[in-house]
Image (cartoon, grey):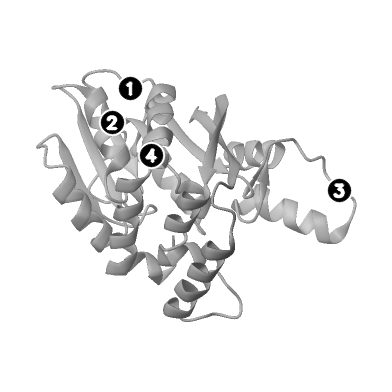
Amino acid sequence: MNSPVWHEAETARRYHIFARQTMMYQELSRLMVQLAEIEPGTQVLDLGCGTGITTQAVLEAVGDGGHVYAVDVSGPMLAVAREQVTSEQVTFIEADAAAITELADGSVERIVCNSVFWQFRHKPQVMAELRRVLAPQGRFVFNAPEPYFMFEAIPRSKKVSVLFEQLAAERYGVGRQDLRSIEVFLRNCGFEIVGKQMLERTRSAAESYLFMQIPVATAWMEPPLEYETRLALLEEAYQLAEPGQATKQRWMYFVTRPL
């Protein structure tokens, strides 16, 4: 989430198109709200709210007495979210996930983070801030997809190169995670896993095509290519792909609480 591409208006526009024309974020949000056990009256932080898809799902769950604090670092993304979700029970906050100064200590009972947590490059600082704003008996729920997350516990290796990557995952939450390393990382940050669930969904070629039009989806490429060049390559790839091609997509959800 440190990438400047997230702050671009074109990212917000393309992201909104993808969210409107596909059901991925709605599907992910439904399970997120369910696992968070959000009840009427709950105070909820939607971390990395984007254009407001999860915010809307949380809003429906909190009822008349609850409130949603929708936080995102991107001004353009929040501008779209404000147009989509106009309830007075939602407060939009433009802030880095590690410095949500508008929220008081222990002010929220649930934190949900849909499709974002695995992208943070400063996870220890984010976790410290979440621990500050979360009530002692609260819950923090987030998800992570393949290939970022490995759906098995990878044992410690005796190889220097592999141990380096595993220690980076355990101490700083960077790189690829697995069931063992993410549990160690969360415990080091003062949280424990109390539940997890895997969601498998089907992604069509058309959905992949739309998603990859979002600038951040291909901004990682090395060597870097201009966005217009990436779009041209994407168009060519889509024309060459099998029309009915679909892939399985797996997400792991984690329900955590403060130690």
Q: Which mark is residue 157?
A: 3
Front label number (3 vs 2):
2
Residue 49 in sight: no
Q: Give the residue pinned by disc 1.
A: 38
Quarter residue 39 falls in: top left
Q: Give the residue pinned by disc 4.
A: 23
Percent from the top left, x then y, of residue 97?
37, 52
Vertically, is 236 above or below 48? below
Front label number (1 vs 4):
4
Q: Choose the circle earlier in sequence order: 3 or 2.
A: 2
Callout 1: few (<14), some (14-19), or many (20+) C-alpha neighbours within 10 Å? many
In whole angstroms, how far apart are the C-alphas of marks 4 and 2?
16 Å
Q: Amino acid at mark 3?
A: Ser
Q: Give the residue pinned by disc 2.
A: 58
Vertically, is 253 above or below 219? above
Q: Amino acid at mark 2?
A: Val
